[in-house]
Amino acid sequence: MYIYIFDSSLEGLLCAVFEWFERKPGKVSLQTAATYQPDAFTPSLHIYNDDKKADRVWKALQSRLSKEWTRRFYCAYLSELTEAYTALFEFSCYLFSSAEGVEKNYGNTHVLTLSQIARKVEREKHRMEAFIRFQHTADGIFYCGIDPDFNVIPLIMNHFKNRYADQQWIIYDIKRNYGLFYDLEKVEEIKIDFGTARTAVAVSKHVLSADEELYALLWKDYFRSANIPARKNTRLHVQHVPKRYWKYLTEKQL
């Protein structure tokens, strides 16, 4: 057994795959630097990021996998789960050591795990696209803070860029402390220092536009008037709109 320690970046993961094929150490346990616990009886190797090595592995993956499977690979990485990192590493080693088409072998534990995790990330991505609600700030920018289970910011970028092409907006992942800003021409990654006022779903009322509170009130009134109490089915409603997403919905805020 050998322990590979990497920095949890995609580049680091790909470099770990490169090192495995170059060194052929046998069975490897992949661990992030943040969770690694030194073991006096198990040899370890710190993986140092190298653009050339990472690019070589990524291009090899793209040549072996369909676009669908390449996206699954990336989605699984965005889950940030320890088991996902292990599955991605083992899947890559399995893929490059076998004949073409092995990614369809769901009897392999790592293929199945990767696919299941990617599906969860895609589900979170779709829910963010459906449940995000913007607030209009006094400087004309539409803002929304989110804290998704997985790092889906890279996956939702094109959806909001295309849907809200005529508005300046910011979608900020509070949990991971980075977000996207669209300036009517391009989308760029940003970081915001919230200080002690950091919140997951809203900005302070004093930075909102004068009409934002009115718009929220009108939407709540519409929602209440369109609701039919006699047909209320809370169980079905929660299945379609889980409670952890209610904090994003204007109609759920009393």
Image (cartoon, rainbow, N blue to C red):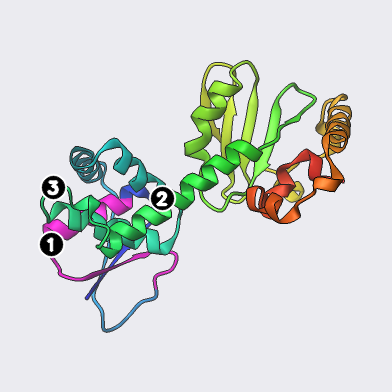
Find residue 162 and report its image quarter.
Answer: top right
Residue at 12% in and 56% down: 97
- Give 229 or 197, whichever is nearer the viewer: 229
**Circles 1, 2 touching at the beta carbon (< 8 Å):** no
Residue 24 drawn in magenta: yes
> In the rendered image, which residue does mark 1 sit on?
23
Who comes first in sequence, dot 3 or dot 2?
A: 3
Query: Mark 1: which secondary structure?
Result: helix
Is 239 situated above or below 58? below
Q: Can residue 198 be seen in this view?
A: no
> In the rendered image, which residue does mark 2 sit on?
118
Q: Can residue 245 be seen in this view?
A: yes
> In the rendered image, which residue does mark 3 sit on?
100
Query: Mark 2: which secondary structure?
Result: helix
Q: Where is residue 7 in the image (x, y as percent from the top left)?
A: 38, 56
Please name which of the two marks, 1 or 2, marks the residue nearer to the observer: 2
The answer for how far apart the CA atoms under marks 1 and 2 are is 29 Å
Q: Where is residue 4 in the image (x, y as percent from the top left)?
A: 28, 65
Who comes first in sequence, dot 1 or dot 2?
A: 1
Residue 236 drawn in magenta: no
